[in-house]
Image (cartoon, helix red, strand yellow):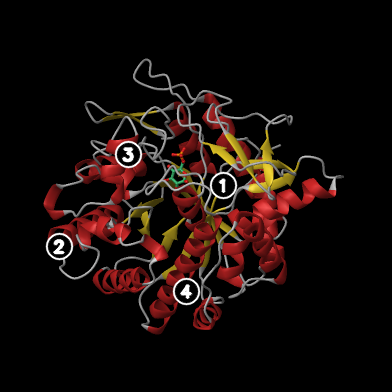
Amino acid sequence: MEKILPKDFIFGGATAAYQAEGATHEDGKGPVAWDKYLKENYWYTAEPASDFYHKYPIDLKLAQEYGINGIRVSIAWSRIFPEGYGKVNYKGVEFYHKLFAECHKRNVEPFVTLHHFDTPEILHENGDFLNRENIDHFVDYAEFCFKEYPEINYWTTFNEIGPIGEGQYLIGKFPPGIKYDLAKVFQSHHNMMVAHARTVKLFKDGGYNGEIGVVHALPTKYPYDPENPEDVRAAELDDIIHNKFILDATFLGKYSDETIKGVEHILAVNGGKLDLRPEDFKVLNAAKNLNDFLGINYYMSDWMKAFDGDTEITHNSTGNKGGSKYQIKGVGQRVFDVDVPRTDWDWMIYPKGLYDQIMRVKKDYPNYKKIYITENGLGYKDVFENNTVYDDARIDYVKKHLEVIADAISDGANVKGYFIWSLMDVFSWSNGYEKRYGLFYVDFKTQKRYPKKSAEWYKKISDTHIV
Ligand code: BG6
């Protein structure tokens, strides 16, 4: 059955500075931890990425031609402040003025993220967001951007506070590559949420132009056996790690009793303590009703069973199905033998999980104002032939997710737009250049762009608003 998306619904495409721009040392850009980390631990680097630093006019022209009226871009903090704070690099500042002007010229509204995984190297080395000094540096950087770029109407503080802490301190696939330290995960989540809240408050108090929000990755967690209370508990605990802790901080300005009990249990089993200060909660509380929007990145759901053995997590970075393992002592274990398709990277494809997640936000956090689906898409080993990619699997994936968004809107959720990850192919942080998501195929050698079949399809949807 056809489903209709509202007239003012945005059909966007998402990118991130480090994954798209390339030019990692050009025009005075400072280093980020990823530069060294990729060289030392993976088989690729952020050069050339999609050379967006030079090719953005081409990407924006394509976006306009294919009916895309919004783009998520992020500012590379170290292009503005090469050392994270202090000396300003005006060539970097200028680059973003030019990028934003091009977006507006093409009627592609820029949704700008201040931090998409790329903390400047010096700040990363002094502890990243585990070091509270870096909260101050982030707020100063944000304030600089608010003053410098009044042309921006939509600001996002952070992209995916959840996966940052988990990638850095649980799974160990992001720098500094620490594994199984759940206290660090929660502390990083908490400190970044404090940084978010301080920034939102400053933005509102300063009367700056536009709206502000945060983007959370929210994978939906289900019990493997819904009749088994232990599996139900496993799903709840894993949800606290990935979703509930940061959602509580965002919209309640505190952690609910359930969340606190869950965290206490997880740390009692796995060790570690948190530093949560009364003044942090003043800040969180002051910002809880000031978020103009919530961005939801949704790719997958997970099914959880109770688990009490040793923690072991293996990341599937190669796209060989079956390569991932996720089991945390006293929390639970991810299981794959459910009747749900999964990608070659073991991501379970379950559109209903997006519907459930949107409705959960609506129900549990009624002070949310509006939602944008800021990332969703299919990572695939695309086959390039006849100057295109016949990516029917991607079309099917996006269609099914847009359908459930239409359902959620019919059921009263205020969802205002969708940004496919990704606009054009970019590289994947911990999976390289072969895991592609774009509407536009990028030949990473020549940096030429080719519309995929999904781009043609997306244009039709954006023209008609009928899925
Ligand atoms: C999100 C990030 O986690 O998912 C993107 O915001 C990322 O930066 C995307 O690329 C897809 O993840 P992956 O690991 O497949 O590249």
Q: Are there few (<14), some (14-19), or many (20+) residues within 10 Å of tag 3? A: many
Specify which label sits upstream in the sequence, 2 or 3.
3
Mark 4 lies on a secondary structure that is helix
Residue at the farthest right position: 227
Residue 465 drawn at (x, y percent): 56, 45
Q: Around disc 4, counting alpha carbons within 10 Å, would you say few (fewer than 14), some (14 to 19), or many (20 or more)?
A: many
* Residue to which mark 3 is pinned: 62
- Of the residues under marks 3 and 1, which one precedes in the sequence? 3
Q: Is residue 40 visible?
A: yes
Kindly identify the residue that appears in the image at 56 percent across and 24 percent down. 321
Type of the residue with mark 1 = Tyr
Q: Nearer the viewer, residue 396 or 256?
A: 256
Q: Residue at 54% x, 61% y: name it.
A: 186
Cβ atoms at labels 1 and 2 below 8 Å apart: no
- Kind of residue at badge 3: Leu
Location of residue 394 with respect to 208 vertically, above or below = above
Q: Earlier in the sequence, mark 1 or mark 2?
A: 2
x 36%, y 30%: residue? 433
Residue count near mark 1 (Cα–Cα under 10 Å), binned few <14, some 14–19, many ≥20: many
Of the numbered discs in the image, which one, if any, rests on residue 89? 2
* x and y percentages locating residue 345 in the rendered image: 53, 30
**In the rendered structure, which disc, 4 or 2, sits on the residue that comes first in sequence?**
2
Is residue 216 rendered to the left or right of residue 140? right
Is residue 118 shown above or below 318? below
Q: Which residue is mark 1?
A: 298
Q: Is residue 113 visible?
A: no
| Circle 2 Cα neighbour tier, 10 Å, few/some/many (<14 / 14–19 / ≥20) | some
Which of pointers 4 and 3 indicates the residue nearer the eye? 4
> On the rendered structure, is 137 left or right of 185?
left
* Residue nearest the viewer, comparing 235 with 210: 235
**In which of the image's four quarters is ligand 1 placed?**
top left
